[in-house]
Image (cartoon, helix red, strand yellow):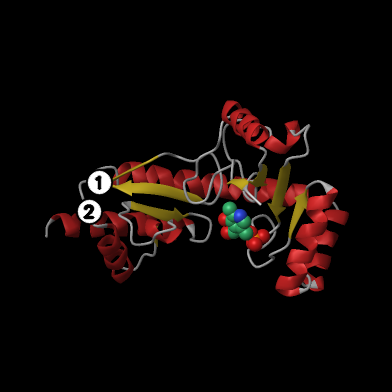
């Protein structure tokens, strides 16, 4: 089966959000060519600035969009419990496919999620973590603006958990990641997200949700130190 896979909110790894106009265009193309859209939205609740953009699923009058979400990004990273909204025929095929993979998702984590939803705790929790991530995202980006602009370009994302940045002036990305790690800070090499990991890539992905505020400040300074060291070579 052919389908279009898209992460319209705070795409991983790019952090980009697809505009409403483009969402409509994707929908029209899928309809025209008779393909399904898999709209993957694990980060949609983690918006820290800007306006919410309606999901493609919200204007799916033809039943061609499979929408999925996850509790891993809003309750706990290890949760690995998600949900899907899709036409019945697709859901029953997905159920069989999942059964062949792991029979079913662990009951314990499903029960935890159920209780979070049943008790109505989830909304307050999402508000709370959104405030924390807003602070951390802005702290990381403010630090990047202060220390890293000579070495990389990036767009401040409106949500999600990552900042995607392009190294400048031929700084060798894999070398940079290795030296940064030796200096005490980990970033994900951009080629980890490529189909062909050996293709040229100048990008790195930085995460702001896990480190403490002090860790973010220190980490960005260490990245600047790493880039400066490489420039001098
Ligand atoms: C775009 C995207 N979709 C889905 C997932 C998987 O989420 P889950 O933890 O529910 O398996 C991730 C996790 O990193 C992700 O980045």
Extreme-left residue of the structure: 233
Residue at horizontal 63%, vertical 36%? 33
Residue at horizontal 65%, vertical 31%? 32
Disc 2 residue lies near ligand 1 with CB under 8 A: no
Q: Position of residue 132 (x, y in %)?
A: 58, 50
Viewport quadrant of the C terminus: bottom left
Q: Position of residue 74 (x, y in %)?
A: 67, 55
Which residue position holds label 2?
Answer: 171
Q: Is residue 151 visible?
A: yes
Residue at horizontal 37%, vertical 54%? 204
Instruction: Determine crowd level at label 2: few under 14, some 14-19, many 20+ residues with C-alpha closer than 10 A.
Output: some
Residue at horizontal 61%, vertical 32%? 29
Q: 39 or 160, which is in the foreground?
A: 39
**From what the image shows, is residue 51 above or below residue 131?**
above
Extreme-right residue of the structure: 118
Q: Position of residue 15 (x, y in %)?
A: 50, 44
Q: Is residue 55 visible?
A: no
Disc 1 residue lies near ligand 1 with CB under 8 A: no
Label 2 with label 1: CB-CB less than 8 Å = yes
Q: Position of residue 117 (x, y in %)?
A: 83, 54
Q: 129 or 157, which is in the foreground?
A: 157
Q: Which mark is residue 80?
A: none
Quarter of the image where ligand 1 sits: bottom right
Instruction: Determine crowd level at label 1: few under 14, some 14-19, many 20+ residues with C-alpha closer than 10 A.
Output: some
Q: Is residue 42 left or right of residue 93?
A: left
Q: Which mark is residue 168?
A: 1
**From what the image shows, is residue 149 above or below residue 111?**
above
Q: Provide the secondary structure element on which disc 1 rests.
A: loop
């Amino acid at each position: 089966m052919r389908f279009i896979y898209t992460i319209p909110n705070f795409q991983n790894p790019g952090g980009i959000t697809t505009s409403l106009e483009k969402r409509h265009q994707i929908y029209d193309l899928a309809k025209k060519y008779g393909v399904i859209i898999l709209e993957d939205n694990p980060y949609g609740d983690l918006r820290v600035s800007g306006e919410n953009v309606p999901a493609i699923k919200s204007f799916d009058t033809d039943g061609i969009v499979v929408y999925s979400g996850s509790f891993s990004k809003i309750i706990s990273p290890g949760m690995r419990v998600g949900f899907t909204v899709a036409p019945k025929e697709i859901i029953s095929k997905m159920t069989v496919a999942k059964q062949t993979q792991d029979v079913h998702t662990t009951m314990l984590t499903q029960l935890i999620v159920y209780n979070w939803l049943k008790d109505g705790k989830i909304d307050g929790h999402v508000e709370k973590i959104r405030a924390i991530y807003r602070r951390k995202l802005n702290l990381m980006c403010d630090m990047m603006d202060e220390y890293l602009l000579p070495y990389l370009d990036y767009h401040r994302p409106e949500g999600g958990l990552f900042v995607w940045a392009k190294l400048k002036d031929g700084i060798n990305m894999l070398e940079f990641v290795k030296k940064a790690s030796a200096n005490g800070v980990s970033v994900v090499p951009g080629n980890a997200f490529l189909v062909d990991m050996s293709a040229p890539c100048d990008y790195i992905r930085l995460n702001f949700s896990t480190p403490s505020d002090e860790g973010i400040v220190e980490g960005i300074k260490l990245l600047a130190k790493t880039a400066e060291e490489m420039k001098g070579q």
